[in-house]
Amino acid sequence: VLVSPQRTERPWLGQIERAVPEQLPEHDPSCYLCPGNERAGGTRNPNYTETFVFTNDFPALQPLADGEYGTCRVVSYSPRHDAGLGELPLHMVERVVDVWTEQYAELMADPRVGHVQIFENRGAMMGASNPHPHGQIWATEHLPMHVEREVERFTATPTLLVDYLASETERLVEENEHFVAAVPYWAVWPFETLVASRRLVPSLVDLSDAERTSLADIFKRLVQRYDRLFSTLFPFSMGLHQTSHLHAHFYPPLLRSASVRKFMVGYELLAEPQRDLTPEEAAERLRSV
Ligand SMILES: [Zn+2]
Ligand SMILES: [Zn+2]
């Protein structure tokens, strides 16, 4: 059952297009990400009007004398407690992409930093502790395992994703002038998608202004499709890989409804992942909403 988008006036951001019914307030006095609120340790957030970046008050990585060097930052996407990437107006999603780009450039300029992982963990089902739309940026000294494996493959075949995109037709979900979103044939999660730039561009800092706008556009439209699929704020882990060919992975857990998820257990943990629907069916369902 699809819920028709409901338009409401918002003082900060203009009109918000709702894909799903939602109970969240625009501002939550108990939220540590909302403007003007107090965070752990007594720091008070500024009354920010766009994005807001700060170093995590409970970082998973800390600079150590002889351990892995690193830092963890949090990016609040907007002052709005209730508007994610699918609901923010395009110019606000562009601002998020711009902040990712600025943060990536700043952190990679530190000679001690070897990798910057930008990601969003969305929804209680994914362990996200706060519904206020936000992402994280972890900078580490070393390449993490998944990224290292990708670098090996890209070193062997630099045009890996260019070649794949050239052959991809029936599993496309969204596309625009500069980016493509598809359910790749190797996807293991039911509605997993890959977003990749059409041209071989290594990272955010190599994008033109027009390409950054295109990236914001495809993220917004892809997340809207996810939200509409089961009429819920679709949970996922999403993140950017930018070592060889800029791309993003969306790993969403849902399978049949807002509450019925896929479990990677049993045979899948011990032998190999099994698909419950084909990548072609998943792409068709995402295109239909
Ligand atoms: Zn909030
Ligand atoms: Zn990747």
Image: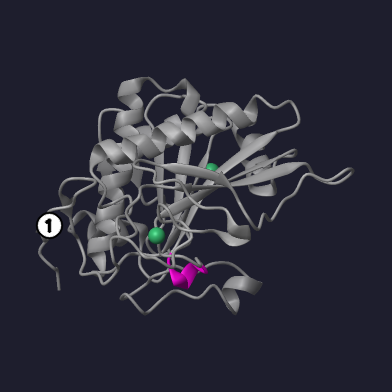
On whether residue 126 falls in the magenta region, the answer is yes
In the rendered image, residue 10, in percent from the top left (x then y), is placed at 18, 52
In the rendered image, residue 54, in percent from the top left (x then y), is placed at 55, 45
In the rendered image, residue 138, in percent from the top left (x then y), is placed at 62, 45
Which element carries disc 1, helix, strand or loop? strand
At x 34%, y 26%, the residue is 211
Residues rendered magenta in the picture: 123-127
On whether residue 256 falls in the magenta region, the answer is no
Q: Quick one: 247 or 69, which is closer to the camera?
A: 69
Q: Quick one: 176 or 157, which is closer to the camera?
A: 176
Residue 233 lies in what quarter of the image?
bottom left
Provide the residue designation for mark 1: 8
68 up-or-down from 206: above or below: below
At x 17%, y 45%, the residue is 14
Q: Does residue 261 appear in this view?
A: yes
Judged left or right of residue 7, residue 196 is right
Q: Quick one: 237 or 6, which is closer to the camera?
A: 6
